[in-house]
Image (spheres, helix red, strand yellow):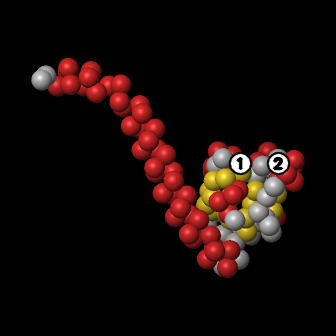
Amino acid sequence: MQPASYFRMMQPYFLPAAVVAYLVFRTMRLRGIKARLPMMIQNGGVVVDVRSTGEFAAGSRPGSVNIPLDELEKRAGELDKEKPVILCCASGARSGAALHILKRLGFKNVVNAGPWQNTI
């Protein structure tokens, strides 16, 4: 079989394989973060939920702080740059954006915990 024909035959499987690989990677990454959370919190870390105030009121991790993503840059001074910051939201997308904002502002020990339920 020629390489080009083999490639054409396998092409329909590339996207599903990539999706599965991404989901496995994400699951393993979140498990690793979840395992480190108790130590981070013990070391003075704070869980910051970047969902809207309404979403936060509907359910959140006890002891977490709500700083909606659209307010994070101006309220970052409320956080200690020397202590761990654990970010969460509904799915991990907004907390991922928040991670980049805080890193740009000089925060060193910041992690995206994904969905807030991962922080419980």
Quarter occupied by the C terminus:
bottom right
Secondary structure of the residue carrying numbered label 2 = helix
Residue type marked 2: Glu
> In this figure, which residue is indicated by the disc labeled 2?
55
The answer to whether 8 appears left or right of 57 in the picture is left
Secondary structure of the residue carrying numbered label 1 = loop
The answer to whether 23 appears left or right of 66 in the picture is left
Q: Mark 1 and 2 residues: CB-CB less than 8 Å, in contact?
A: yes
Residue type marked 1: Ala
What residue appears at the point 46 percent right and 51 percent down from the top-left corner?
25
The answer to whether 7 appears left or right of 89 in the picture is left
**For this rendering, which residue is in front, 80 or 85?**
85
Looking at the image, tell me whether mark 1 or mark 2 is earlier in sequence order: 2
> In this figure, which residue is indicated by the disc labeled 1?
90
What residue appears at the point 56 percent right and 69 percent down from the top-left corner?
35
Q: In x, y percent, where is residue 63?
A: 80, 69
